[in-house]
Image: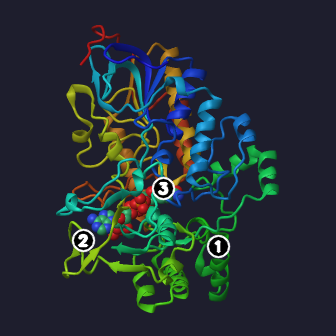
Amino acid sequence: MSVKTNTISCVDAVVVGAGFAGLYMLHTLRDKLKMNAVVFEAADDVGGTWYWNRYPGARCDISSYHYSFSFSEEIQQEWSWSEKYAAQPEILAYLGFVADKLDLRGNINFETRVISSSFDESSQRWTIKTDKGHTVVCKYYISGVGTLSTATIPSYEGKDTFKGEVYSTSTWPHQGVDFTGKTVGIIGTGASAIQAIPLIAEQAKHLTVFQRTANYATPLQNGPMNPAEATAIKADYSRFRHEARAALAGVPFPNMRESIFKDSPAEVQQHLEACWKEGGFALWLGSYGDVLFDEKANAIVAEFVRNKIRGRVKDPKTAELLCPDYLYGTKRQPCETNYFETYNRDNVSLVDIKSAPIRKITETGLELSNDQHHDFDCLIYSTGFDAFTGPLFKLNLTGRKGIRLQDYWCEGPRTHLGLMTHGFPNFFMITGPQSPSVLFNMPLGIEQHVEWIADVIHHMETNDLETIEPEKAKEDEWREVVESIANSTLMPKTNTWYTGSNIPGKPRSFMVYLGGGAAYKQVCDEVVDSEYSGFILDNAAATQEVAVL
Ligand code: NAP
């Protein structure tokens, strides 16, 4: 159902977001649990991250067939991917296809942003308010807002004075941008910019890239989907999905070797070369088991990638500037297509803003701390996201005793399993902080979360329970689990959005469970089997009728 504005509606469940997570959650609530559910979505269509991130070159970097839902055999069989790694328009079309196939759009309130979410202890219900004047009271409240949906733009002095065109890779215009004949500046060289830069460079009169940190980008090796491979996958989807779920990051890399030190130097080079040719995340997550654990192993792969960069970029000074010096793979590895060759073009220049940071934005461009001025017609920000917590805080959640989520999480996220947080009963986070989320196959991780939430709701309804929330002590234990696994790897040694250190003032904690999807699912399943050990389940009836806050 869709809900009316300026009136109070009561439903069983509210879901925020109509990306992969929101769509499957809605389908599960409405069609499997037979519940009354509504979705609020800020965009005017489904798609989530793939609705907003329309910059040139945007595409997934795990293979298309892995980057899709597994819950419906009919959808799996009907949909075919045209490329090994699907581009944004095709992924968006896929999500539109899913929404139509399951007839989901009628329950989604588009162009509607949640502005507040409050739990009322006496009625034991959530009240959700939107910018369109909806007030909806519900028992279950589920976030499908994603992890990378709150973009951040640095607060440079003079930011609003620039007189040219300003773009952000995370909210790219739907009609596209024609840079023909224009000079362009782009700030940031993360995964988004690395996809966009080669295509913008082909069009612009001149492109200036402002780089603070060079990245270990490796080739995606995209191409048309091999029809025989697609047919084989479709003929045996259950094995394909089974292998994916069993793999640490939700995508199998069968050629992974245990330790780089068990091979001779020549064998190492040969194996790294094979991973390079395989493309995608093969080098990062599928080369050697010790690369993300042992600094010496890591250094070998880091130097391998730097040598590749040196071999591709003609100007030695530019090549060195493009060579990263942090621990390989501790930042999310970007995948690229012609990224490094782009710097061989006459119309592209690279500016180091680590040694001379941006001092201010001006009417015509920007000024660096070394007094250099750079002028351009268009300025693009590709400066990342307030990951994990940013999108949740925007929901303005207030739990028991009027506590705001921001205050409860003032020292970093407190969750059990990354799914729920104490004091915010019946509130669920799909791919929340401290779950495998961004370091697992996203669609499969989302399915596991949605199905776990559905199990909880089914248990609650069949046992006449009113609320569920984790014990506070379990959150401390879970944080310890997440942090100790992360600390056994090299990942926390680098400042990244995984730790929150890309955002000034954000408390630092490792926000991804790195134990792998299978181990994580086992922990979640054990909770269900134990009838929710570690969670407080309450069947106390409400002390008063719904009070709208
Ligand atoms: P990002 O990786 O966080 O990169 C942000 C870039 O902006 C970095 O180069 C960063 O430099 C720079 N930056 C940030 N603040 C700055 C400042 N104040 N001054 C100068 N430079 C600044 O963001 P992203 O590229 O949007 O990617 C984020 C994540 O989205 C990825 O890691 C990935 O998980 C996801 N993504 C996925 C895909 C895909 O699946 N195909 C594609 C794109 C993105 P520093 O490194 O020095 O901080």
Nearer to me, 367 or 191: 367
Q: Secondary structure at mark 3?
A: loop
Alpha carbon separation for disc pair 1 and 2: 40 Å
In what quadrant of the picture does the C terminus appear?
top left
Amino acid type, mark 2:
Leu
Label 3 vs 1, first from the N-terminus: 1
Q: Residue at x 41, y 90 (%)?
A: 317
Percent position (x, y) of residue 316?
Answer: 45, 91
Residue 366 numbered mark, or none: 2
> Circle 3 is placed at which residue position?
514
Q: Residue at x 46, y 20 (%)?
A: 2
Label 3 vs 2, first from the N-terminus: 2
Q: Is residue 520 left or right of residue 499?
A: right
Amino acid type, mark 1:
Cys
Amino acid type, mark 3:
Leu
Query: Is the CB of mark 1 within 8 Å of ligand 1?
Result: no
The image quadrant that residue 392 belongs to is top left
Nearer to me, 266 or 228: 228
Alpha carbon separation for disc pair 3 and 2: 40 Å
For marks 1 and 2, give the one nearer the viewer. Answer: 2
Nearer to me, 421 or 546: 546
> Circle 1 is placed at which residue position?
275
Instruction: Report if residue 492 is visible in the image.
Output: no
For marks 3 and 1, give the one nearer the viewer. Answer: 1
Percent position (x, y) of residue 128?
Answer: 33, 24
